[in-house]
Amino acid sequence: MTSALISTFHQSMINLSGRLTSPRCRARSRTVARTLLAASLLLAAAAVGGMGGALAASGQASTQPPSTQQQPANQGLEAVAEHEAALEQLQARLRALRTSIDDNLRYRDALFKELRQFERDIDDLSRANRELEALVTEQQAALVATEARLQALRADLEHARAALADLVRTAYGLGHGDQIRMLLGQEDPRRAERLFGYYQIVAAARAARVEEIQELEQGLHRLEQRERKDTARLARLASRQDRTRQRLSSALGARAAILADLEQLIADEQIQATALSADADALSALIARLKRSAEIAAEAELTPASITDRRGRLAWPLRPARILRGFGEGRAHGALHADGVLLEADAGSEVHAVHHGRVVYADWLRGFGMLLVIDHGGGYMTLYGHNRTLMKEVGEWVESGDLIALAGSSGGAEHNALYFAIRHQGQAIDPGRWCRSTPVDATSG
């Protein structure tokens, strides 16, 4: 059966699906996870085909050799259990992702409420900004008017000072001699009285001018103070306007950033949830098919093939066989093919089956290129990778020595080579202990 091999692919798929929640590897993880899932489905589908053909095989016992019969039905049940475990893990990931989406949607709703108030504040700031601009315009007009009044007052002050100077000169022109004569009685009394009246008039006019000048000077001082205050106020208003504009710009920028990040996060998680949901549906359908196939196999209850009888006497798939990399070499460095051997091959070299069995996988697989897997019964399988051409299809029976593929360098191999591995219950075993002769070490010369 293929259950052990399939479980390996399912575990890789689950591990990759678990990393889908990292934003930095979403796209690549989805692609790789879907590739592994596809490979897993193909392998499992092959198993379905194998179990589905069990009844037909039992009905054609006269035309098929006994060694080509399928494994016991409990192998199919093990595959179902493995798939159900994988499905449960996948569904757990999906539930966690949907919970995250729900949380983010609630967070988005809360943010929208905040943003609604935020936009209202922005509107208030805009109105305040317009009012501030009107105040600045009004203040500038007031400053212009104040400046005009200052100029008029300065002109009045100069005029008052000139009038005062005229009064002083007039008073001086009357002469001090007339005043003395008037006091000594040497002046005509009527003229003296008239002169005294002139002095009073001049003195009163001079006092009025002095008072007017003092008032003008005080008014000028007040206007100058007001102008300084208005100028300072205008500067404060201008500074306030700049701060308001900065707040408005920052508010708009923050709003755009929050919305963009939140919408992108939700969109990414929804894409992941859709992909995981599709994978879960496909896996559920596969489990249903496997259960049905297991039931069919249970009815047939076929006998395992006897590949163990030929241990140490199997022929190598290439003739002659030259090893490029032996079993287990590079395992410490995570080499992909450490669980098998890599055999040197010319492009188009014939690849032969090492034992009779049924083809359960024949397709491209990441890292192995065109891969063919043969189920030999009893939990034993052989794998042949990096082929250029596959000569058999899923479901076909093969005998020892049958041509199954042409060697090549598919799947990213650096040169033409054949990946050959033997598995028992999913565990890798050394092909050198099962084949009848040790091949030449191609790396030794």
Image: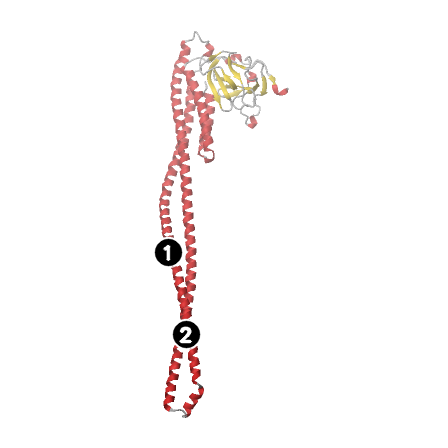
Q: Which mark is residue 430?
A: none
Secondary element under disc 1, as helix, strand or loop, is helix
Residue 317 shows in this picture: no
Q: Earlier in the sequence, mark 1 or mark 2?
A: 1
Instruction: Determine the CA span between mark 1 and mark 2.
Output: 39 Å
Q: Nearer the viewer, residue 102 or 257?
A: 257
Secondary element under disc 2, as helix, strand or loop, is helix
Q: Is residue 33 left or right of residue 120?
A: right
**Could you classify mark 2 by the number of other residues whose Cα lies within 10 Å: few (under 14), some (14-19), or many (20 or more)?**
some
Instruction: Name the amino acid, label 2.
Output: Ala
Residue 437, given in percent of the width and then of the height, sits at 58, 14
Residue 433 shows in this picture: yes
Residue 125, given in percent of the width and then of the height, sits at 38, 51
Instruction: Please give the name of the residue rendered at 40% of the width and 49% of the height, measured from the top-left corner.
Output: 248
Residue 280, given in percent of the width and then of the height, sits at 40, 27
Task: Name the outermost residue toward the top.
Answer: 62
Instruction: Name the amino acid, label 1.
Output: Ala
Disc 1 to disc 2: CB gap under 8 Å: no
In this rendering, the answer to whether 36 lies above or below 233 is above
Q: Quadrant of the C terminus?
A: top right
Which residue is label 2 attached to?
160
Q: Nearer the viewer, residue 154 or 234?
A: 154
Which residue is label 1 attached to?
134
Instruction: Please give the name of the residue rendered at 38% of the width and 49% of the height, measured from the top-left corner.
Output: 122
